[in-house]
Image (cartoon, rainbow, N blue to C red):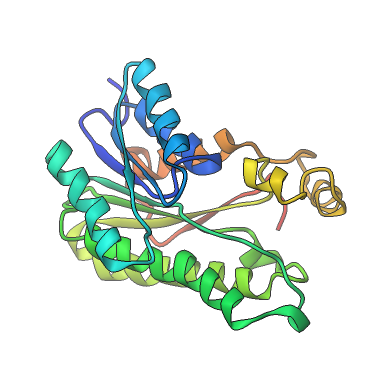
Amino acid sequence: MSKLTGKVAVVTGGSKGIGAAIAKALAAQGASVVVNYASSKAGAESVVEAITAAGGKAIAVGGDVAKAADAQGIIDTAVETYGRLDILVNNSGVYEFSPIEEITEEHFHKHFNVNVLGLLLTTQAAVKHLGEGGSIVNVSSVVSRITPPGSAVYTATKGAVDGITGVLAKELGARKIRVNSVNPGMVATEGAHSAGIIGSDLEAWALGTTPLGRIGQPDDIADVVVFLASNDSRWLTGESLIASGGSR
């Protein structure tokens, strides 16, 4: 039997990149998956098609996690469709690097609304349905450790995610709900390509500081999330697993 047979998972920001890989990996292990998207309906539907073509179960659900009603709607749809909720992966996120001279209120609120408030609102909606054995996995970043120049706001949001992970692990531990984070290093996603990161000096720097000598792939992160979502990690909560090829 697969590790997640009979489980129901919600993956926010699941239409591409790391989120898409996570959704497919959870489904491959037997979970029924709700693939959330904010803007790319076509991307989410493509992920769902890939999952169902492989024999899995998945649906695409739109919603902006930074809006309480949308966050609640994503969770409600999961429960209405599959009858339960076992796993929440808070993957939705945005990132833009700016030096201190160029940080604006809009830049700040955009990042904190999605990366931090969105995580809190979706988790708040989910904990009403998660029971004993439930798992929350927050997708953070190694930037909270390496604090690269030009990333003050983005790094601040991921530092917040790490802190929230620890707090909620203690809050929800008595209910036997585990809360952990995975902290990726640089990963070759569509976003990294479109932002010009792949092939840039930043990628060269990342390669030079990564002992395993390569950039991460979405599947590298997805497999860690499967571990954290499954009973294999039953004795882990409040942990931040750095998945960066050794860069930190």
Q: Where is residue 239 in the image (x, y as percent from the top left)?
A: 45, 59
Residue 85 visible in the displayed image: no
- Image-based side of 55 in relation to 149, left or right: left
Q: In which quarter of the image is the C terminus?
A: bottom right
- Image-based side of 142 in relation to 45, left or right: right
Q: Where is residue 214 in the image (x, y as percent from the top left)?
A: 76, 38
- Image-based side of 24 in relation to 172, left or right: right
- Image-based side of 60 in relation to 114, left or right: left
Count of all numbered marks drawn on residues in the image = 0
Q: Quadrant of residue 100?
A: bottom right
Q: Which residue is drawn at the image coordinates 77% and 76% (left, top)?
A: 99
Answer above or below: position of 143 versus 231: below
Q: Which residue is drawn at the image coordinates 75% and 67% (left, top)?
A: 148
Q: Which residue is drawn at the image coordinates 62% and 67% (left, top)?
A: 144
Q: Where is residue 98 in the image (x, y as percent from the top left)?
A: 73, 71
Q: In which quarter of the image is residue 32?
A: top left
Q: Quadrant of the N terminus?
A: top left
Of the pair 172 and 97, the residue shown nearer to us: 97
Q: Which residue is drawn at the image coordinates 72% and 53% (left, top)?
A: 247
Answer above or below: position of 21 versus 143: above
Answer above or below: position of 156 versus 82: below
Q: In which quarter of the image is residue 211?
A: top right
Residue 197 visible in the displayed image: yes
Of the pair 15 and 224, the residue shown nearer to us: 15
Q: Position of residue 146 (x, y in %)?
A: 71, 65
